[in-house]
Amino acid sequence: MDSNITSNCCVFSTSILDEVLPPILILEFVFGLLGNGLALWMFIFHMDSWKPNSVYLAHLTVADTIILFCLPFRADYYRRRKDWIYGDVMCRILMFFLAANRAAGIFFLTAVAVDRYLRVVHPRSRISRLGLGYATLVSCCLWAAIVAMTVYLLIFSHIHEYEDRQQCESFNICLDFKGDNIWHDTLYLLQFFLPTIIILFCTGGITYQLKTKTVDTGGRIRRAVYLVLTVSLVFIICFLPSTVSRMAVVVLKTQHNECSYFKATNLAFYTSVCLTYFNSVLNPVLYYLSSPACSRTLWKFWNKLFGRTSEGEVERRPPPFTVSGRV
């Protein structure tokens, strides 16, 4: 792994990433597009009744779909040994889409967990009984906050010259402490830790409700626990590794000012960032687990695909969770 300094930023050439990441990114694109395409189809054409939770999941699907269409560009970038050929404007747009839709994935997953918590632990509260208008307003506010937090990526250039190539990176390790670099790292870390605290709180509250409630009618609280635990698992798998490696970069920047010290952490970060895109592959599984409409439609599609017409068998399958206001 070679390194160089460009405009006080460390620029690395990592051949192993150029070989390993393109096929991984393409696989994530293909499987993610299949899952999210099916999810969009079900939300648009087969969602019988919309509830607040389904609104959040629909927005999550849109965010995942947008980020998936960025992956072929990243795969091509690594295939060319980190040489960006599409110009500065496209680089800024790509970095903005990747950051904004990563944040959207985290925020709407958190909204799902909070919605389950309110409906299980505080079912009689006014906020837990608000309908689609409230969920739509929350979603619009989340998107507005996301754009406000990431729009700076459209303002600054992310092109770094290295040998005869142009690298397009928003996470290059810059040894100075400029405001945009500090904000970029701070935002990346806060996007993980704050939602994680909220999700753990929701999980604890729902679990406590399950243990203290004498009768869990229809297993509704248990299903809510499983749903929030699934959200927590997605967080851990997809976002924890890159967060830890980025924290290591931040700590090292306070102790060293030579690029050679950052080679291992740089490699670890860009490898683990691929797991954040894997979130878009796992989320359709969450839709299936949380929605009876999704599970029924998927089983019907599966049966039609293989020539099975036993509708009664499909309908009798008990959906494990629900996207609707009923847990």
Image (cartoon, rainbow, N blue to C red):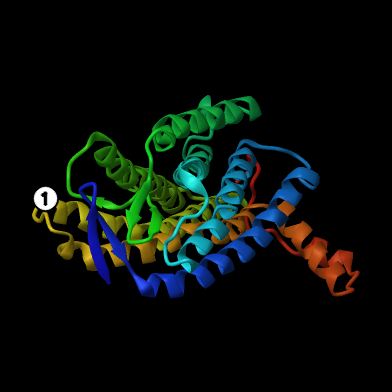
Residue beneath disc 1: 254
Viewer-side residue, 45 vs 296: 45
* Relative horizontal placement of residue 144, taking residue 247 as reference (left or right): right
* Relative horizontal placement of residue 85, taking residue 181 as reference (left or right): right
Q: Position of residue 114 (x, y in %)?
A: 47, 40
Task: Reply above or below: 83 against 43.
Answer: below
Task: Reply above or below: 21 against 204.
Answer: below
Residue at point 78%, 42% (across, down): 48
Mark 1 residue type: Thr
Q: Position of residue 252 (x, y in %)?
A: 15, 56
Residue at point 16%, 65% (across, down): 260
Q: Position of residue 33 (x, y in %)?
A: 65, 59
* Relative horizontal placement of residue 321, taking residue 8 as reference (left or right): right
Task: Reply above or below: 22 against 120.
Answer: below
Disc 1 is placed on an element classified as loop
Most extreme residue toward the front is: 164
Viewer-side residue, 135 vs 191: 191
Mark 1 surroundings within 10 Å by alpha-carbon count, few (fewer than 14), some (14 through 19), many (20 or more): few
